[in-house]
Every structure is written in structure tokens, then in C-alpha cells.
Amino acid sequence: QVQLVESGGGLVQAGGSLRLSCAASGRTISSYAMGWFRQAPGKQREFIVGITWSGTTTSYTDSVKGRFTISRDNAKNTVYLQMNSLKPADPAVYYCAANVYGGTWYVDGMDYWGKGTLVTVSS
């Protein structure tokens, strides 16, 4: 089993930046596809950006392209989300998730989830 723990959330002013971390334990995640998701109040959880074992990144969310960057450090068994130019529409609980079998990004298809970290943006 894999445990995922997110950190780095908090309150930030619009236009500011945050760096979220997802620390994995239990097993190495170097061969897993890793993704970040978010869920705003009253809305469905959505995929933001993912990264495969080889470092290929994927995002279908136009609102975050160019602002959010995913990366991984296999030596630390950790994945990161760098969030720049945060907007009032970005506040949500941000979740880290792992897919053992490859780069698929369906919410119901992810194998492991963290408990999330809250990001709040003030305008």
C-alpha cells in the first residue's frame, strides 16, 4: 500500500504562488503516474495535471495551463505542484493521487489518494 500526504496549502493573495508537496510512503512511486486534482465547494473533483513515470506531463484544464506545473523527485518519493498567478477561482481542496498502471486520469481510476490540502485565494 501507498500513503500520500499533501502539504503546502494555505491562504495566498491573488497573483501569488504556492508550492504543494505530496510525500509518498510505503512503496516507491517512481513507476506510477501521479496526478493532482482539486475539488471546490459544491463541485465535482477534477483532474488538473498529471505526470508519468518518464516525466511526460498532461493537462486538459485550460484555466491552469501556464500557471501550474507538476514535477516529481523520485529520490524523495515526492511529487510537487507549483502554482503561480493564483486566481480567486482557484480555491479548492487539492488532492494528490497515484495510478499504478499508467497515465490515466479518471478520478475513479486512481489507486491511491491523499487526504487533500486546502488552498484559499484572497482578492
Image (cartoon, grey):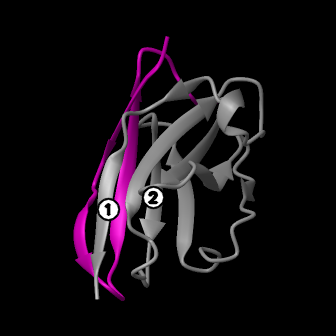
Residue marked by disc 2: 40
Nearest the viewer among 91 and 57 is 91
Secondary element at image label 1: strand
Indicate which label's residue lies in the foreground, 1 or 2.
2
The part of the image, by quadrant, that contains residue 101 is top right
Q: Residue at position x 42%, y 14% from top?
A: 26
Outermost residue on the front side: it is 42
5 lies above or below 7: above
Please state if 32 lies on the left or on the right of 121 as rendered.
right
Q: Is residue 121 magenta?
A: no
Residue at image location 30% in from the left, 54% down from the top: 118
Query: Secondary structure under badge 2?
Result: loop
Q: Closer to the N terminus: mark 1 or mark 2?
A: 2
Three-letter code, disc 2:
Ala
Instruction: Say whether residue 2 is magenta.
Output: yes
Quadrant of residue 29 in the image? top right
Q: Which residues are magenta?
A: 1-30
Q: CA distance from mark 1 to mark 2?
A: 10 Å
Residue 16 visible within the image = yes
Residue 59 in the image: state x and y as whole percent. Answer: 71, 62
Residue linked to disc 1:
119
Relative to the observer, which residue lies in front, 63 or 102?
Answer: 63
